Amino acid sequence: MSSSLLGGVTTYIESQGGGEGLFPTQIASVNITRSYQQRMPMRLIYRPSLCVVVQGAKEILFGEDTLRYGAMECLVVSMEMPASGRVVDASPQAPYIGVTIDLDVTMLREVLEQLETPPVPPATPGPCVFVGKVDEPLSECVLRLIRMSQTPKAIPILYPSVMREICYWLLTGPQGAELCSLAVPESNFMRVAKAIYFLRANFAQTLRVEQMAEVARMSPSSFHQHFKQLTSVTPLQFQKQLRLLESRRLMVADAASVEEAAYKVGYESASQFSREYSRMFGVAPKQDALNHQRMYSQYASRKARTA
């Protein structure tokens, strides 16, 4: 099945003009990436998603943990979180090719409720990202989504059923227990997730751990412990990463100056902002923004075409 998926995704990329970079599809939640070379780490906000490597290999760094996943393996992200991903195996002859599919938490919950023998969430949840194998049923679903994107009229009718199937294979697979934590109401996992949504909406404000714990309906000590278990960082480290990632977006996409970006994301000192930005991304803010503008200008406006 791996050769069928590789052929299907490659055919789609060539129908979009070929080359490398990000290839959006007519399905808003499905995107394809192709790279002819290894890439430096790229720090992003990862949403709940299924990230399938069709060819090559990639690494993700979240907190202090690093995961590597290669051809016909997938990364499952079950909670919104900042992390750093990089392509580690790619060449013009065998480029890195990956497919990212956003997960629908509501649909996951609906499928979980219908399982005759649902997986049991672990008593002590681990990190909210894990690597698994892409077996034939899951590979077939991904291929169907890619082919479906060439027929826009079919998407509203067929897309929900394929996504339900993907949820089924994930929940009944080896890592189903870890993933089902995302769909169980009032679990510690979901309590932390609520706090993260609150943090995302208010990251530019000065927040205390006690405020976030109150949103999660947990004691501050329990909240801090579970937050670190799931994300590998503390709540305040998480907030800092959100601020710096948003500042990068403002400078790259909106052409904000360093000072404007710093103040918009909640910094009172531009010099402190520059120090923390350089520490996180390894380069000064202005130079980093210029690097990213050049990197993505060639395909930032790429739109999905239909056959």
Image: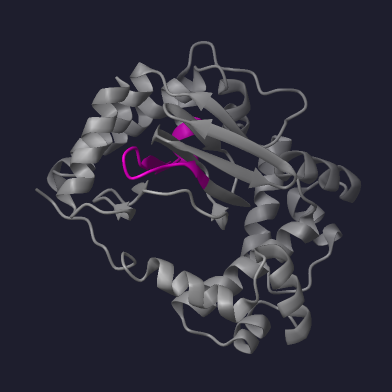
Residue 163 x, y percent position in the rendering: 35, 33
Left/right of residue 285 with respect to residue 160 in the rendered view: right
Residue 107 on image: x %, y %: 43, 35
In the rendered image, the vertical position of residue 175 relative to residue 75, given as above or below: above
Q: Is residue 67 above or below residue 236?
A: above
For this view, does 209 lie left or right of residue 147? right
Looking at the picture, does residue 227 appear above or below residue 289? above
As rendered, which of 177 and 61 lies closer to the eye? 61
Q: Nearer the viewer, residue 12 or 28?
A: 12
- Is residue 228 left or right of 55 when viewed as pictured? right
Q: Quadrant of residue 260?
A: bottom right
The residue positioned farthest toward the right in the image shown:
221
Magenta stretch? 87-109
Which residue is at 77% across, 45% downward? 227
Q: Is residue 287 magenta?
A: no
Residue drawn 63% across the image and 62% down it: 200
Q: Residue furthest left?
A: 307
| Picture residue at 31% right of the left edge, 53% below the top | 20
| Image location (x, y in percent) of residue 75 | 52, 35
Q: 260 and 217: which one is in front?
A: 260
Is 107 contained in the magenta span?
A: yes
Residue 157 seen in the current view: no
Residue 271, how many percent across, how many down?
Answer: 76, 84
Q: Is residue 235 in view from this perspective?
A: yes
Residue 141 placement, left or right of 206: left
Q: Quadrant of the N terminus?
A: top left
Residue 254 to residue 209: above or below = below
